[in-house]
Amino acid sequence: MAGGRELSDTIAFIRKLDRARSPDDVCAMLLEITRRFGVERVLAGLIPMPGADRRTQLSHVVMSAWPEEWSRRYFSHDYLFRDPTIEQVQKAATPFLWSELEPAYRSDFAARRIMEEASEFKLKEGYTIPLVTIEGDVAGFSLAGERLEMSPEERSMLVLVATYALGRALPLRKIPQVPAADLTLREREALQWVAEGLSDCDISEKMGISEHGVDKHMRAARSKLGTVTRAHAVAEALRRNLIR
Amino acid sequence: MIHIVTPENAHLYKDEMEQAYRLRHRVFVDEMKWTDLAKPDGREIDQFDDEHAVHMLYIDDGRKVLGYQRMLPSTRPHLLSDVLPQLCEDERPAGPHIWEWTRYCVEPAHRERGRALSPVANALLSGIVEWGLESGVNTIIIEMNPLWLLRLVQLHFRTAPLGLPQPVGGQDTVAVTAAFDRRTLVRLQEMRGNCQRVLVQPANTMPLYLAS
């Protein structure tokens, strides 16, 4: 007995995934195999803890072929924790069509607005698959487009395809780098004098600015280096060869 | 520690096997509502619990069984061949190196609670890999909720679906083969933070028929 097309396509996709070298490669392969169902957009990510800030939310995205403008709007308006699809992913472990959620969020103004705005970005119909990682994190895998057409067999196939795609993309993810410290010349100069052991008063004289100005440069440098204390900022700047 | 129980040593594990059958009943009948398996005496035993089955028990220091799983040879009748053949669309995998993993269950208090694998779950999985590497088994057949698949992939099991997920008794179920090797064992050891053996039984007392 030979398997149906959905199974053989799934197996071919799993084999192909071995060649992916980045989450973007995985995304492209996924779009290729799901295009025939009307899928134009893909987003997969781990669900952050409630209240997580914007940077944390963004770092939880594993792969994305989502409209950029919509992503910007979504994260800057903090839509994540009011998004009915995210709520559903955390509530139940079964895949769902966005249209199936409609009755539940109809009376929730914020949720309805998010879904309406999404549809303006051609995310009109969607299919979301909840997954759980070995670390115990819940992940959401959304496939969307203007119009999706999938038989029940094809939906089952997408569950497998999404699982393998996420399993491949997770280890290919770049560990988020320490944000690049784009220190200004004046901030580096101030740091250099601190490293030499000068007082704020001395530095203000050397740089021809007020002590308040020195403090301002140092505060900016501390935050750009992701440090809290002056000593830590100096150590970090030395480590990154920003000062000598 | 994981104890392997076969006809050769079953007389040493009378009480523990009794606990294992009761744990199976509590988990599969009472909790998961697989009512077909219900038994009036509260011991879940089926037609595959014969002399060919290999039982693996997680037994704590107080001789209490906290986890259980059963391995069945794919060369004899097993669930995929006799009970759930519809889950396999392609040719059914069979051979001395392929065994079927069934009846995995863990006492509720010892499961993962929204966290990584619990120690009992890790030991049971490690038990399969240690046993397999020592007895020439490198692939297991699994029928499970598709939600488990990602975790197996992340544990370096090389899995391949045998069919699409289908509802079985109200739950989506997919059949897969999962091949493993030393990398899988290392990954499981990393996750639990030590590389001590989980199997109690030394390799040289394995039943001969596994050595083929």
Image: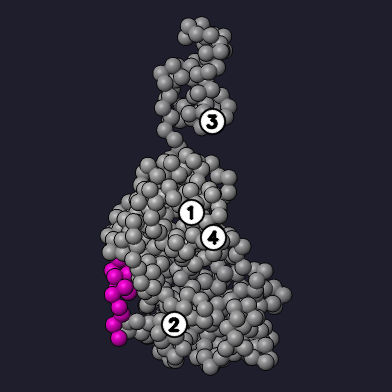
User: Can you identify the residue that label 4 sits on?
Assistant: A104
Q: Is residue A3 magenta?
A: yes
Of tags 4 and 1, which is closer to the observer?
A: 4
Quarter placement of the N terminus of chain A: bottom left
Q: Amino acid at mark 2?
A: Trp
Magenta span: A1-18
Mark in the foreground, 1 or 2: 1
The kind of residue on which mark 4 rests is Ala
Secondary structure mostly seen in magenta is: helix
What amino acid is labelled 1 in the image? Leu
Q: Count the numbered circles shown.
A: 4
Say if B164 sits above or below A206 in the image.
below
User: Which residue ends up furthest to the right in the rendered image?
Assistant: B62
Q: Which one is closest to the eye, mark 2 or mark 4?
A: 4
Instruction: Calculate the distance from the C-alpha at mark 1 to the C-alpha at mark 2.
Output: 34 Å
Q: Secondary structure at mark 1?
A: strand
Q: How is the image coloured?
A: one colour
* Chain that bears disc 3: A
**Is disc 4 in contact with disc 1, using a CB cutoff of under 8 Å?**
no
User: Is A13 left or right of A77, judged from the image as shown?
Assistant: left
* Tag shown at residue A227: 3
Q: Is residue A3 visible?
A: yes
